[in-house]
Amino acid sequence: MQALVNKIWYQGHHAKWLLLPLSALFWLISSVRRWAFKLGFKQAQVLDVPVVIVGNITAGGSGKTPTVIYLINLLRQQGFTPGVISRGYGVNIDGVKTVKATANAADVGDEPAMIVARTQVPMVVGAKRIDAAKQLLSETNVDVIISDDGLQHYALARDIEINIVDGQRRYGNQCLIPAGPLREGLWRLNRIDWVLNNGGKVQGNEVAMSLMPADLKPVKPNSTQQWQPQVAIAMAGIGNPQRFFDSLASQGYSLVQTKAFEDHQAFDENELKQLSQQHPLIMTEKDAVKCRDFAQDNWWYLPVNAKLNTEFDTAFLNRLNQVIKDKQGNLHGVR
């Protein structure tokens, strides 16, 4: 299914025309909801601390999670205590749930499990981000909240918005879901503070971002094994698996087979064991958190770190400090 969707969204497949009526319906529903907030029929709730949204206007992966981790580290270096909220995509959560470092991805979502495992940041997930944010503030002393995704979740007032665009695929055929990848029209980019271009040629006011790979690490917890160069198999259950496969090839890894899964897919233990019978298996860090409980000795994952320039860091921190000043003495609650 994901392969067909990619053909329609990014390769000009004619099935787009059959889906345009559904895209029109999607536009109508999303527009009514958006205007309800704009006209005051619904009100966004304002928090006492700055809220930073890291999202995209397209469906599928673009590099949001590495960007969230980058911001966590940047804020900590400046003395802030950041916390993170997320919907926990792909799992059913009754209310809200605090994410522990040992959390199972099936319970909280793969991105939240990965973020907390990597950073130990305070994090709460829930279908309603405003509820997750309130729970986070009640449990911790965080002074900045980062929302992993949520540009379209207008019930939560935001102070800074960052959009990540896949620099290779960009906005595809520029149609709304389901005929295209857009959650909102390209007009939305004019209201966003920064557009980060992940791995492509920057256009307009975009900021260049790249994902820098680190050394392979064993998926099996507490393993002390070291990677030895050898022929391997690669798998990925992310929005753009080919980007991961190409990255491995460009780093010199010799791949005899690649296997793409659906984004956020739960993996079958026996299938992966069979896949890795003859050769080591390399996967993404997001996939690795879903495989920790049954990982084999020859399973490895590739950590990646977002890289941005110091000009962005300075501009972001200046904007954040201005937000903090503006909030001091301001009315709390509903804007």
Image (spheres, rainbow, N blue to C red):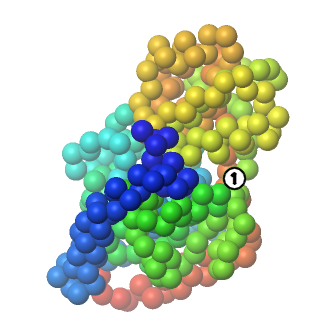
Q: Quadrant of residue 233?
A: top right
Q: Secondary structure at mark 1?
A: strand
Measured as percent of width and height from the top left, residue 126 is found at: 30, 52
Quarter of the figure that contains the C terminus: bottom left
Can residue 119 be seen? yes
| Place of residue 250 in the rendered image (x, y in percent of width and height, measured from the top left) | 79, 41
Percent position of residue 164, x then y: 56, 64
Residue at point 68%, 30% (across, down): 217
Residue drawn where x is 31% and y is 46% of the image: 97
The residue positioned 49% from the left and 40% from the top of the image is 3
Is there any visible trace of residue 76 in the rendered image? no
Q: Is the residue 264 above or below the residue 171 in the image?
A: above
In terms of depth relative to the viewer, which is nearer, 93 or 180? 180
Total marks placed: 1
Residue 328 drawn above or below residue 104? below
Circle 1: residue type? Leu
The residue carrying pointer 1 sits among few (fewer than 14), some (14 to 19) or many (20 or more) residues within 10 Å by Cα, namely: some
Q: Dividing the picture into quarters, in which one does residue 188 lie? A: bottom left
Nearest to the observer: residue 196 or residue 129: 196
The residue shown at (72%, 42%) is: 247
Q: Nearer the viewer, residue 125 or 122?
A: 125
Q: Which residue is mark 1?
A: 211
Asked whether, in this view, residue 201 is left or right of residue 134, the answer is right
Judge whether 222 appears above or below 121 on screen.
above
Residue in the foreground of this view, choosing between 180 and 137: 180
Q: Quadrant of the N terminus?
A: top left
Report whether 50 appears left or right of 29. right
Residue 158: x and y in percent read 40, 75
Q: Relative to 124, is 28 on the left or the right?
A: left
